[in-house]
């Protein structure tokens, strides 16, 4: 499976906004984007003429990279979103939000989505009492994500309550850090997604 192994801060600089790919580091003065808020490379500061296609492409790349999804996966989500009732762009974001690795991150059990994906792959969490290892699993209303007793000594998980207090938890999720458990109370709504994305540009890109 393809994997990005270069500096993650270059991605934020290239997309022109914070994607919080390095967790807590993004909230400190060490954040590379705060220090150099322009694209990486020799010509990063140069003014460039941007076409409509380039704007749409950057919006798609920004969203895909924020959720840590490969192009083939992302295209698959879009095709499923098109077949569902409702607004295609919103459906796309809802499916990305309902990924298990994103839910683990939103509940405060990991400092980044990348770290959440790794923890899920190692079987650290259970979904409705069953051990799961698939980060792309779609959660449903009423699902319970929990950490078994034997895994609660992991240092990253022990910081769950502190992370939630600092970052907050979306309204569609309920985090019980003391019990190492989280519940899906409802399906995500567009207002719950604070990530700065214009999903209509993604729809326009794929609809060409």
Image: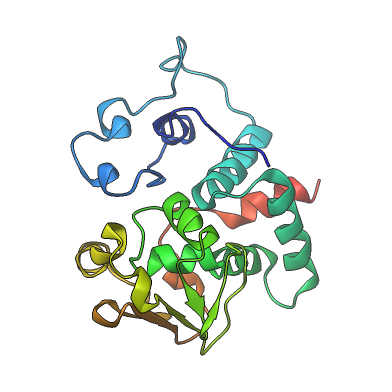
Tell me what residue is drawn at x 42 percent, y 52 percent. Answer: 115
Q: Position of residue 116 (x, y in %)?
A: 44, 58
How many marks the image carries: the answer is 0
Nearest to the observer: residue 60 or residue 179: 179
Residue 207, horizontal then vertical, whole percent? 79, 51
Q: If the image is split into quadrants, where does the N terminus sit?
A: top right
Which colour scheme appears in the figure? rainbow
For the C terminus, the image quarter is top right
Q: Is residue 126 left or right of residue 52?
A: left
Task: Identify the residue at image location x=46%, y=71%.
Answer: 125
Q: Is residue 11 left or right of residue 155?
A: right
Q: Is residue 107 above or below residue 141?
A: above
Instruction: Give percent across and percent down for residue 78.
Output: 72, 59
Residue with the most extreme front position: 150
- What residue lies at 39% left-to-right and 75% top-to-bottom? 147
The picture places residue 123, in percent across and down from the top left corner, at 51, 65
Which residue reaches farthest bottom? 142
Q: Is residue 40 above or below residue 92?
A: above
């Amino acid at each position: 499976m393809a994997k990005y192994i270069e500096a993650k801060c270059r991605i934020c600089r290239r997309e022109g906004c914070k994607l919080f790919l390095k967790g807590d580091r993004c909230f400190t003065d060490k954040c590379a984007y705060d220090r150099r808020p322009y694209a990486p490379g020799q010509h990063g500061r140069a003014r460039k003429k941007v076409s409509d296609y380039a704007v749409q492409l950057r919006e798609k790349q920004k969203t895909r990279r924020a959720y840590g999804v490969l192009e083939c996966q992302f295209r698959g989500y879009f095709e499923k979103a098109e077949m569902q009732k409702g607004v295609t762009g919103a459906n796309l974001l809802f499916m990305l939000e309902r990924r298990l690795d994103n839910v683990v991150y939103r509940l405060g059990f990991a400092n980044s989505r990348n770290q959440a994906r790794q923890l899920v792959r190692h079987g650290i969490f259970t979904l409705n009492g069953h051990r799961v290892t698939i980060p792309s699993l779609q959660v449903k209303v009423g699902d319970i994500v929990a950490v078994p007793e034997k895994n609660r000594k992991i240092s990253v998980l022990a910081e769950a309550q502190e992370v939630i207090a600092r970052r907050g938890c979306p309204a569609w999720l309920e985090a019980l850090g003391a019990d190492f458990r989280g519940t899906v109370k409802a399906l995500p709504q567009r207002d719950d997604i604070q990530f700065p994305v214009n999903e209509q540009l993604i729809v326009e890109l794929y609809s060409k």
